[in-house]
Image (cartoon, rainbow, N blue to C red):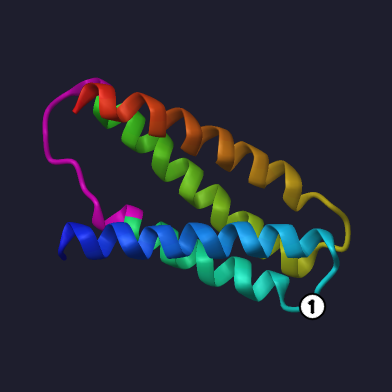
Amino acid sequence: MNQKVVSTLMMLGALALLAGAASMITKWGGAPYLYCVGALLFVAMQMIDRYEGNDFVIKRLRRQQLLGAVMLLVTGVLMFVERHNGWIATLTIAALLELYTAFRMPDKQ
C-alpha cells in the first residue's frame, strides 16, 4: 500500500480514537463505536507497516508497538462490557507504549 495512504488512514484512525475516548467521558452512547472504528483503523495500519530488518532494538520496539495496539483493542472491548472506568487503565498503558515507540523508533531507522 502507498505510504501516504497508510499515513493518512492512520491519522484518521488516531483522530477517531481521540474523539471516541473524549466522548466516552461525556457518556455519549456512540463513543465506543467511534473509538473501536478508530482503533481498528489505527491497528490495521500499524500491522501493514512491517519491519523486515535484523536490528534487535527495532524488533523489540516493534513488539512493544504491537502490544500497545492490542491494548487499544482491549480498551474498545472494555468500553462495551464494563460499566466502570477500567478502560482508562488499558488506554493509558497503550498510550504510553505507543508514545515510547513513536519517539524511539525514528532514531533507529
- Horizontally, residue 53 falls left or right of residue 58, namely left
In reply to whether residue 53 is colored magenta, the answer given is: yes
Image point (87%, 63%), residue name? 83
Q: Give the magenta range.
A: 46-57
Q: Quadrant of residue 101?
A: top left
- Horizontally, residue 17 falls left or right of residue 89, namely left
Dot 1 falls on a residue whose secondary structure is loop
- What amino acid is labelled 1 in the image? Gly
- Horizontally, residue 104 falls left or right of residue 68, namely left
* Placement of 31 over or under 84, stated as above or below: below
Image point (57%, 60%), residue name? 17
Q: Quadrant of the C terminus?
A: top left
On the image, the x and y values in percent for residue 76 come to: 64, 62
In reply to whether residue 19 is colored magenta, the answer given is: no
- Horizontally, residue 59 falls left or right of residue 67, namely left
Are there few (<14), some (14-19), or many (20+) residues within 10 Å of tag 1? few
Q: Which residue is mark 1?
A: 29
Image point (35%, 65%), residue name? 9
